[in-house]
Amino acid sequence: MGRFEMSGEDNLLRLVEAEDGDENNYHLQDQVGFILRKAHQRHVALFASHIGDLTPPQFAALAKLHDIGETSQNQLGTLIAMDAATVKGVIDRLKARGLVEVSKHEVDKRRLLVNLTPEGRAAIERLIPLARTITEETLAPLTAKETATFLRLLAKLA
Amino acid sequence: MGRFEMSGEDNLLRLVEAEDGDENNYHLQDQVGFILRKAHQRHVALFASHIGDLTPPQFAALAKLHDIGETSQNQLGTLIAMDAATVKGVIDRLKARGLVEVSKHEVDKRRLLVNLTPEGRAAIERLIPLARTITEETLAPLTAKETATFLRLLAKLA
DNA sequence: CTGATATCATTTGCATACGAATGAATTTGA
DNA sequence: TCAAATTCATTCGTATGCAAATGATATCAG
């Protein structure tokens, strides 16, 4: 289906359509969703290379608990953008490793309170500097000005 | 832990450190990895709202096969940024639905060739216009100029 | 007060995503 | 040539991520 095999009519059509963005061909590698997925993959790989024993979602849970203190599992999920099923798995694994502990809310018996253990607090405080490095490496292909622009626009899409 | 409970010494420390970017506090919601994850989540949700019966990775596989024609499973994985284990699962599910078919490479017996079926070709050609809409909606919070800038910078990170 | 709603957590099922190990086939290099 | 290294595919284990269903509890409206 090379362009050199097109008839004159097809060629005319192509020339007309080229004006509004080559609508005839679909280039997966130019789609925002595909590039977004790849950029996310690269970040996760960088994260793993620096922090091998914790995933980004696990880190996010610990960092948020460190920031705001004890909360319900549901509220934590909202703050770190995880649905209820996902956050449960993350908390279960952190609990199994002794990094967080859970307790029942005294008043509202539906709620499960989550908090850092001393080990969890030590871990997140040790890891935050590494996370800053990961952020830097993720953004390393951009200049400082580009980084500011990128983060501003990315935030609009999130 | 409010700032109004800080001692005078802490306050001085905070003022000094504020000069190089508030390094004492870690704000998860400002980290590129976290925002990248949320932006990706939003895109996947938009995708699902328009194309309910196919996931973005499945769509990517069909779109790439439509673009380049028959190829090995391994090569396809490289082109759509999936490792061998992941692409196998995606192809297995597309195969089970009759959208792709696989065959053995005659010369190199290690390779598994993958190609669209007529049904797969019809499906991807029907879905590509929807995918364009999804791209538009994903980028809707940005102006045209911002979109161009964003895609250029995002590509640098991917 | 109480029935309808809403919220919180859990469970199940399905689909990525990737590291590590394995086996088969191919390519390389001394 | 032939042993070593590489490539391709598969399998296993672990970890998100989300929809849907369920059960317990809490809130709201009449």
Image: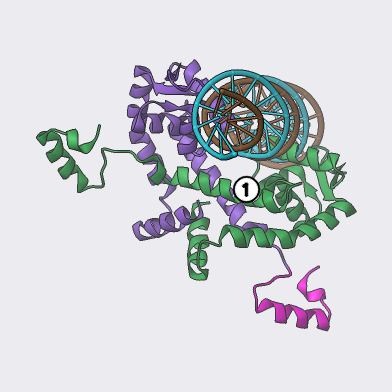
Chain colours: A purple, B green, C brown, D cyan
Rendered residue at 56%/51% (across/down): A36
Q: Quarter of the image holding residue D3?
A: top right
Would you say residue A58 sits in the magenta stretch? no
Query: Disc 1: which chain?
Result: B
Place of residue A147 in the rendered image (x, y in percent of width and height, measured from the top left): 39, 56
Q: Is residue B88 left or right of residue B120?
A: left
In this view, the residue in front, B135 or B88, is B135
Q: Which residue is mark 1?
A: B44
Q: Is residue B126 left or right of residue A112?
A: right
Place of residue B29 in the rendered image (x, y in percent of width and height, measured from the top left): 41, 43
Q: Secondary structure at mark 1?
A: helix
Q: Is residue A81 left or right of residue A19?
A: left
Q: Residues within 10 Å of mark 1 (few under 14, many from 20)?
A: some
Rendered residue at 52%/44% (across/down): B37
In this view, the residue in front, A114 or B51, is A114
User: How many labels sit on residues?
Assistant: 1
Residue A80 visible in the snapshot: no
| Magenta part of the chain | A1-24
In this view, the residue in front, A84 or B83, is A84
Would you say residue A3 sits in the magenta stretch? yes
Q: Is residue B91 above or below residue A157?
A: above
**Mark 1: amino acid:** Val
Q: Is residue B56 above or below residue A129?
A: below
Place of residue A54 in the rendered image (x, y in percent of width and height, measured from the top left): 47, 28
Rendered residue at 42%/54% (across/down): A151
Place of residue D7 in the rendered image (x, y in percent of width and height, measured from the top left): 69, 40
Q: Please state, as top left, top right, bottom left or bottom right, where the N terminus of chain A lies in the image.
A: bottom right
Rendered residue at 43%/53% (across/down): A141
Q: Is residue B156 above or below residue A112?
A: below
Residue A92 visible in the snapshot: yes
- For this orientation, the residue located farthest to the left is B8
Q: Is residue B118 left or right of residue B132?
A: right
